[in-house]
Amino acid sequence: HLIDPRTGKPAVTDLLSASVLHRRAVCAEAWAKVALLLGMQAGFTRLTELHVAGALAGADGQVRMTPALTDFLAQEERQF
């Protein structure tokens, strides 16, 4: 459960999940929560603008990966 600090109530969002990769777990957790609160479009835009590696799963079944995550996965794949 996520409480929206703007309302003090449970967050209402069009996202089912937000996952973020970061070398610091606390940063990954914070950015994932920001994305959840903002929703699919605004969350994806914000993560992309800040070059954060993340994946968002919407309630409609849509999954979006930020360019930073796509780049990270491509680099990892080349190592194998």
Image (tube, rainbow, N blue to C red):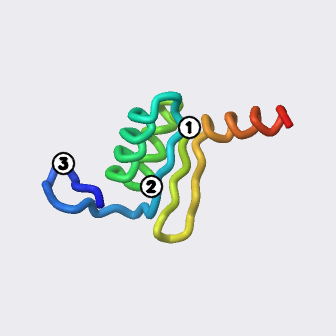
Placement of the C terminus among the 4 image quadrants: top right
Query: In this view of the protein, which residue sits in the foreground, 77 or 61?
Result: 77
At 83% from the left and 32% from the top, the residue drawn is 79
Instruction: Name the element at disc 1.
Output: strand
Q: What type is the residue that disc 2 sits on? A: Met
Residue 13 placement, left or right of 50: left
Crowding at label 1, few (<14), some or many (≥20) Cα neighbours within 10 Å?
many
- Which circle, 2 or 3, is nearer the viewer? 3
Q: Which callout, 2 or 3, points at the residue further toward the start of the chain?
A: 3
Q: Is there CB contact under 8 Å for labels 2 and 1?
A: no
Residue placed under numbered mark 3 in the picture: 5
User: In the image, residue 56 lies at what x, y percent?
Assistant: 51, 53
User: In the image, residue 58 lies at what x, y percent?
Assistant: 49, 63
What's the distance in space between the residues labelled 2 and 3, CA to CA?
Answer: 18 Å
At 35% from the left and 44% from the top, the residue drawn is 34
What's the distance in space between the residues labelled 2 and 1, CA to CA?
Answer: 15 Å
Q: Which callout, 1 or 3, points at the residue further toward the start of the chain?
A: 3
Instruction: Name the element at disc 3.
Output: loop
Placement of the N terminus among the 4 image quadrants: bottom left
Residue placed under numbered mark 1 in the picture: 53
Q: What type is the residue that disc 3 sits on? A: Pro
User: In the image, residue 71 lies at what x, y percent?
Assistant: 69, 35
Crowding at label 2, few (<14), some or many (≥20) Cα neighbours within 10 Å?
many
Whether 14 is drawn above or below 37: the answer is below
Residue placed under numbered mark 2 in the picture: 40
Q: What type is the residue that disc 1 sits on? A: Ala
Whether 58 is drawn above or below 72: the answer is below
At 56% from the left and 64% from the top, the residue drawn is 62
